[in-house]
Image (cartoon, helix red, strand yellow):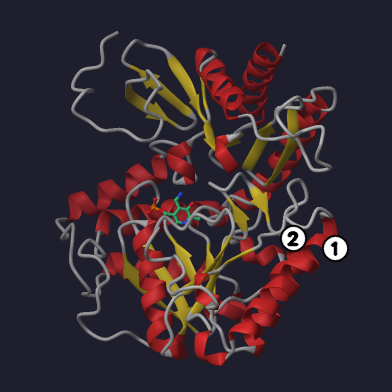
Amino acid sequence: MRRPLREPVARTYASSLPVVPVRARGLTIEGADGRRYLDCLSGGGSLALGHNHPVVLEAIGKVLDSGAPLHVMDLATPVEDAFVAELFATLPPAFAARARVRFCGPTGADAVAAAQKLVRRATGRSGLLTFTGADHGAPEGARAASGAGDARATRLPYPQDYRCPFGVGGPEGAELAARWTESVLDDAGPGALPAGLVVEPVQGEGGVIPAPDAWLRRLREITEARAIPLIADEVQTGVGRTGAFWAVEHSGVVPDVMVLSKAVGGSLPLAVVVHREDLGTGEPGARAGAFRGNQLAMAAGAATLAHVRRHRLAERAAALGTRMLARLRALAADQPQIGEVRGRGLMIGVELVDPDGAGAAASAGPPPPAPRLAAAVQRACLDRGLIVDLGGRRSGVVRLLPPLTLTDDQADAVLDRLSEALTCVLA
Ligand code: PMP
């Protein structure tokens, strides 16, 4: 079917997927051609409850029916109060006890930029230190600032077992990554320290790489010792996705700042920064994004947070994730083109590699990523009615971000289709 009005729209994402969604519910999207797809892209992880969940629709409907304003900037409203109360009910208590929330946005990148601004003011320093493979959605805002020899210009190693930058993996690789960070900061000296250090507890766009809990605790020690605010970017990992309500809870780390977006808006655009109160309360007029007062998003977000909390969907995500990873790992065992299956909760990645690729045999490390293979698997999934995402170094990782409302049968259906696609492409 010809896509109406498609040509004028520049698409950088999912652009080759010939799906014209006209209806959606839960895991399922229905195309204009009547075909149904299982959506494991979930708006990049924005749809914790899937499409058009009744509690979200009801919350939005209530605001619309009430005659309340749809958008008010910085004025307290009952809708905002309810969102803040629900957000604080979910935050780790040690963090919530001394936290303030500021609305910004509406995107995750805006929230990262707002967090950067906050820690700049608080520390009088500039630049955010980031990690290799990180995606904070703000290529300029969240990238290191100055020139060579300055800690702020450096990307620090993010530990991972499969492509360990030190070639050792495991706890040893994570400890080397921590020491690298220490040495960069110590070499820089106090004059060139960054304003903050921002980390994803599980890298999403970077290829679904869970940070080891022990390494996150080391980062906490390292930053605390140098009075560098630690910013947890939970834009993608938040709201139950990784098997804890917030991914920092796995390690017990209490960050100074949390950056939240995507699922906190219950499928509508919303972004917030939650921070230690002594980092500042913000001056009037500080740039934070005109659409920071989106009442529908706050209502949808509050309903989503409440539903995930009441129905213990984080625990459900943990159990489902373990089951799905086990089945995918069994499939990968005799498939040399699947380099690694990894994830945490319902953030799942399957890395495709080229075992015969240039340099694969010569180097002791893993084979090179196979982006074409990954794209072929994505396509084969679509042919079987399954929408998946790609990510990772050179887009070699097939990513699944299903809603937390996934049933056991739906999980099986997703895995049946993915397994079939993998078997077909890798045959
Ligand atoms: N942080 C993380 C961890 C993300 O995954 C993303 C988007 N994928 C962003 C920030 C940016 O969010 P947005 O696309 O809403 O700007």
Q: Is residue 67 above or below residue 286?
A: above
Q: Is residue 216 left or right of residue 13?
A: right
- Tell me if I can see residue 104 in this picture: yes
Number of other residues with Cα within 10 Å of mark 1, as a class: few under 14, some 14 to 19, many 20 or more: some
Residue 66, percent across and down?
A: 19, 55
Give the mark nearest the N terminus, 2 or 1.
1
Q: Is residue 252 above or below residue 160?
A: below
Residue 378, percent across and down?
A: 54, 23
- Tell me if I can see residue 312 in this picture: no
Residue 244, percent across and down?
A: 65, 57
- From the image, tell me which residue sits under label 1: 172
Q: Quadrant of residue 393?
A: top right
- From the image, tell me which residue sits under label 2: 212
Q: Is residue 142 above or below residue 28?
A: below
Amino acid tagged 2: Pro
Number of other residues with Cα within 10 Å of mark 2, as a class: few under 14, some 14 to 19, many 20 or more: many
Q: Is residue 56 above or below residue 8?
A: below
Residue 44, percent across and down?
A: 46, 42
- Asked which secondary structure carries label 1, the reply is helix
Identify which residue, 422 or 296, lies in the foreground.
Answer: 422
Amino acid tagged 1: Glu
